[in-house]
């Protein structure tokens, strides 16, 4: 699998293009992501949102229209796509597929699994494709997503971190901000963050 990444907008939100078996998956197209995406895809098959915050979904609608492909968004965050108290000028988008918690999809042999880890927001998920996991704003390198935003829940984040601790395998994590890390690396810090919440 080939993974391209480009930080977008003032918050430097990572937009990813994961290419596997000749299929391009666009993950979290944020502010002004459209031009970069269009220059770097050859066979786009889906747009995937880890969650619904504006800096991860800004270019959803524009890419849906330009590429004619489906948008997959965690069900709990769909209301966030229609407006943002932080960003009133957020271009609204409507997903083609409302992803249920922990739902898996098969794109002609390529498995895409949404792992539900609420806390940062209701639908917050990590997206697993082959040997990579796109962790959105749930887990970063030595950090976790904030829980002081509207719709955030420290209690849900604690439960999500407990669930994260039980993942029995190791894979590379590609967060929504910053550089890569691994499951095993971040599991070391789970108890610390649980105690901080």
Image (cartoon, grey):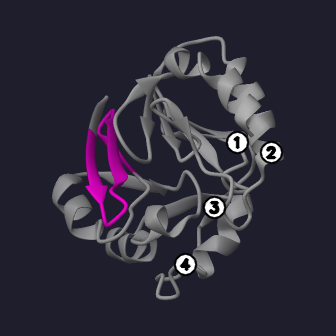
- Spot the residue most to the front: 196
Residue 111 can be seen in this image: no
Q: Which residue is mark 1?
A: 116
Sooner in the amino-acid sequence: mark 4 or mark 3 = 4
x and y, in percent, of residue 43 in the image: 28, 51
Sooner in the amino-acid sequence: mark 2 or mark 4 = 4
Q: Which segment did they paint magenta?
A: 4-26
Residue 181 can be seen in this image: yes
For the residues bearing labels 2 and 4, Cβ distance under 8 angstroms:
no
Mark 4 residue element: loop
Q: Nearer the viewer, residue 105 or 3?
A: 3
Quadrant hosting residue 190: top right
Q: Which residue is mark 3?
A: 97
Quadrant, the N terminus? top left
In this rendering, the answer to whether 148 lies above or below 193 is below
Label 4 to label 3, Cα distance in Å?
25 Å
Sooner in the amino-acid sequence: mark 3 or mark 2 = 3
Mark 1 residue element: strand
């Amino acid at each position: 699998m080939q993974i391209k990444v480009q930080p977008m907008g003032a918050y430097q939100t990572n937009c990813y293009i994961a290419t596997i078996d000749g299929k391009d998956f666009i993950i979290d197209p944020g502010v002004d992501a459209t031009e970069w995406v269009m220059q770097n895809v050859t066979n786009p098959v889906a747009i995937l949102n880890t969650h619904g915050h504006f800096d991860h979904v800004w270019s959803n609608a524009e890419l849906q229209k330009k590429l004619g492909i489906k948008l997959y968004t965690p069900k709990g965050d769909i209301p966030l796509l229609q407006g943002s108290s932080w960003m009133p000028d957020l271009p609204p988008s409507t997903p083609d597929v409302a992803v249920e918690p922990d739902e898996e999809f098969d794109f002609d042999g390529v498995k895409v699994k949404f792992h539900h880890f609420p806390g940062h927001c209701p639908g917050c998920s990590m997206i697993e494709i082959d040997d990579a996991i796109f962790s959105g704003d749930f887990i970063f390198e030595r950090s976790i997503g904030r829980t002081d935003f509207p719709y955030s829940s420290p209690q849900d984040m604690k439960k999500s971190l407990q669930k994260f601790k039980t993942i029995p395998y190791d894979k590379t994590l590609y967060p929504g901000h910053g550089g890569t890390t691994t499951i095993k690396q971040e599991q070391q810090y789970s108890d610390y963050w649980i105690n901080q919440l």
